[in-house]
Image (cartoon, rainbow, N blue to C red):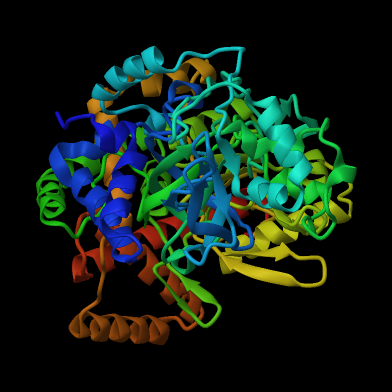
Amino acid sequence: MPCVGDWLNNPLSIVRGFFAQNAPNSDWEKKVTEYFKEKLKENNATNWVPSLNDVPVHYLKPNSLVKFRCMVQDMFDPEFYVGVYETVDSNTNARVLHFGKYRDVAECGPQQEIDLNSSQTVTLERQTFYCVPVPGESAWSVVVLNPHLYAYISASQARVSPSTSYTPSRHKRSYEEDEEMDLHPSKQKEQHMGNSSGGDIHGCVEPKRLETEAPAGHHLVSPNCSPPLDLNFPLPGEKGPACLVKVYESWESFKVNDVLEVYGILSVDPVLSIVNNEERDSSALDPMECMDTAEEQRVHSPPASLVPRIHVILAQKLQHINPLLPACLKEEESKTFVSNFMSELSSVRAELLGFLTHALLGDSLAAEYLILHLISTVYARRDVLPLGKFTVNLSGCPRNSIFTEHIYRIIQQLVPASHRLQMTVENMNHSRFIPHKDYGANRLVSGVLQLASNTSLVVDETQLQQGQLDTTGVHNVTALGNLITWQKVDYDFSYHRMEFPCNINVLITSEGRSLLPSDCQVHLQPQIIPPNMEEYMSSLLTAVLPSVLNKFRIYLSLLRLLDYSISDEVTKAVEEDFVEMRKNDPESITADDLHKTLLVARFLSLSAGQTTLSRERWLRAKQLEALRKARLQQQQCVNGNEL
């Protein structure tokens, strides 16, 4: 067990030490980063860092080290901050240097004043990201996998208990407030008169948290904020904290919709909410000091109790969010994990195929294609064409919400992130699919299609009835079609649209052929008709052992990350085979059919743990495609529906 010492509970003391030893040399910043990087490598120390995904904010000590797994929902404009500043003791005139990095609030002793005209003052820049929990993240991937963390939560409860009272630290002020006081001495006097309680030189009197638990949903009511604060989650009904993540280095490598894991210092000082205080006299503000609109201030400076700040020390872009897999598969330990799992992959595939066959009412062909769909991913782009997308239209589904709902629940238990979109006229006309720019608040307003890479989107068409789509509905259906065809969403910036590439696995369930485009239509042929659909579908998940379910989850996530290639020899054999098929029956296969069969062969090979195409897998892919097409032809003969 790593020592839960100053680096975890009071990381600013570590930063202060490096700053004191190395200032004003900028090397102290690199040393801080290296220190925490090394600490997190020791004895699985990352498991001891509390996560905002798992632990409510009110259980966490302010200014402690935390981690957060999140998606970048929006990027705010870069902000300037005082990186180094100097204080002067009013009694002795002694000068002390302080660092401003990893902080929102200035550190100032009882008899000290900040000298903003000091030659030692350094102004720096940082980037703020508005981050939300990964949209549609499955409950199984959010649970705390490390039981040791509960010990930390218990200890945290002893240190910071929820309270309805609040005692502010006397000598903590925001940098913006310090600047305002410099321009308005009367406010400075009022500040000293209003705060007469004592505090030490480092402002270590810690405030108790006013808020205890943030309610679920988009809107949270703050005592200083009216109307309710919109947390801007992409999906309705989402829970979890939104955070302002402040990045100091290499922020240009991160972009909107990236999934990150950040380690940083938690900042929840109530002074951060000062711009939301309705009692504050807005007429007293110098208009030159505040160029932002009130709405922009409200969005960019929400109450810290509802939207905490994280000052990032370390951040990494995640390949995946499956907690059962190593974060990076290129490390030696990860290679051992992959090797061990590959040894039992064939048995896991067989069990998963059997499980999905039962879920699809005994249809093993549909189960095969569902596996291929679940491991598909966009692996490259040629001009505007995304390669590797494999949208499946599962037609022939019973017009019964129980079946499609349970199919989604099963997928939800297998993949780390998913969302079910019920395609009804009402949803199409009233839902916000496309993110758009709100210039008044200077933020990107989220939409249902703002999803993280590799999210499984299940579109349920079985509930679709006759009705009229309005302008919004037409735009939403068009956006869905573009997502499926081009794997991109055109965000609305009012005066123009901006393309955001994505990598979303779309499964469409429908009675007949879907109204939406797809790469592959598989018509469901139930072999069993359970007398009680609800009972039958519910029993499937309860019958699977948790250990087996975890193997399914590892299987589907791991195979998406494997490399794949086709040898020159096999490429030549496939070309010859294609020419031969065209010679025998020119109408039977087109270039598009060849591309689709190659895609099936790719995922069929990967599903068996093979990273190259063999002739055996190619023949099996042709066989699957022949069976699928024959089934569609048979269905056309039965009811005359268009294929």
**Residue at horizontal 75%, vertical 40%?**
187
Image quadrant where residue 288 sits: bottom right
- Inspect this view and state whether residue 23 appears: yes
**Residue at horizontal 62%, vertical 44%?**
510
- Inspect this view and state whether residue 131 appears: no
Q: Nearer the viewer, residue 221 or 195?
A: 195
Q: Nearer the viewer, residue 144 or 162?
A: 162
Task: Give percent across and percent down for residue 353.
Answer: 31, 40
**Residue at horizontal 64%, vertical 31%?**
237
Q: Nearer the viewer, residue 376 or 453?
A: 453
Image quadrant where residue 159 sits: top left
Q: Nearer the viewer, residue 490 or 110?
A: 110
Task: Give percent across and percent down for residue 609.
Answer: 20, 56
When the figure is inspected, residue 332 is found, relative to residue 525, above or below; the finding is below
Task: Give percent across and percent down for residue 370.
Answer: 42, 47
The quarter of the image holding the C terminus is bottom right
Q: How many marks?
A: 0
When the figure is inspected, residue 39 is found, relative to residue 581, above or below; the finding is above
When the figure is inspected, residue 231 is found, relative to residue 602, above or below; the finding is above
Q: State left or right for residue 482 relative to residue 593.
A: right
**Residue at horizontal 54%, vertical 34%?**
268
